[in-house]
Amino acid sequence: MVETPDTLPARMFLLAYDLRKERMTMGGHRLGYVLRAAALTELFLDGRLGEERGRPVPGTPGDDPYGVLARISASRPRSWQHWIRKDSRAMVRAVRDELVRERWIRVTRERAFGLFPRDRVSVRDPRVVKTLWGGASSALRGRPVAHVNSYDAAALALAAAGEMTSVLPRSDRRRHKRRIEELTARTGPAVPAVRKVLRAQRAAAAG
């Protein structure tokens, strides 16, 4: 059996990696939004985060690996969208550094076109990504929604909301729309919120 990372943000980072092209398929703010939503979703699923009046509130005390719960506890009530946008780039770095420390990935420095420095991510064991992809795929096409593993359901719902083509091509998002909606309903408020954040970002860019 292939081991996979424990945290949902770490899993989503690896799912954004394209094994065929050997590179990340998304980055910057968009990846950060998905990872922040994954952290919020993990806290919500485990009962460490609840919801009141459409806003996240602290729930049962527990682990807070990315400091998200501490920030919410110290703040006045704010929307799910606020916490998805908050520190999105820092979230990418935090998750990437976690995966490097735990030896899931390598990060090397290179120059794009021989000029611009950038970090290149490579996965140490491709089987890890294949296993995570298999879990998300089975959530989409396998057993009844109520029996799907909660993290597999969350990964698929987050991939759909974040438009992660490495997991869900657009054609699959259209074809399995109802199933995705059912999985999203199981996953909590952060998934619809990340979809709203991305739509607002696109609208602002178009304007």
Image (spheres, rainbow, N blue to C red):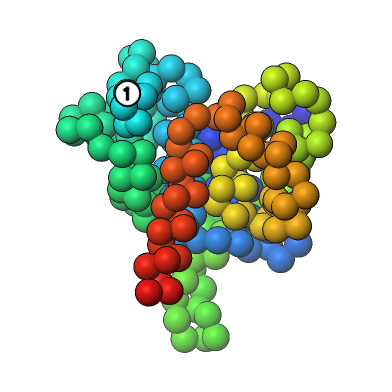
Tell me where residue 170 sits by quadrant: bottom right
57, above or below 26, in the image: above
Q: Determine whether, in the image, residue 194 is placed left or right of residue 26.
A: left
The residue labelled by disc 1 is 52
Question: Residue 89, image x and y in percent?
Answer: 37, 55
- Most extreme residue toward the right is 142
Residue pictured at 31% horizontal, 45% vertical: 82
Q: Is 150 on the left-hand or right-hand side of 85?
A: right
**Crowd class of label 1 (few under 14; some 14 to 19; many from 20; radius 10 Å):** few
> Can see residue 52?
yes
Looking at the rendered image, the quarter that the N terminus falls into is top right
Q: Residue at 50% of width from left, 78% of height from top?
A: 111
Q: Residue 159, percent across and down?
A: 61, 47
> Which residue: 76% across, 62% down?
20
Which secondary structure, mark 1? Answer: strand
* Above/below status of 51 relative to 86: above
Please tell me which residue lies in front, 36 or 106.
36
**In terms of depth relative to the viewer, which is nearer, 68 or 96?**
68
Q: Is residue 92 visible?
A: no
Q: Residue furthest top?
A: 60
Q: Position of residue 156 (x, y in %)?
A: 65, 40
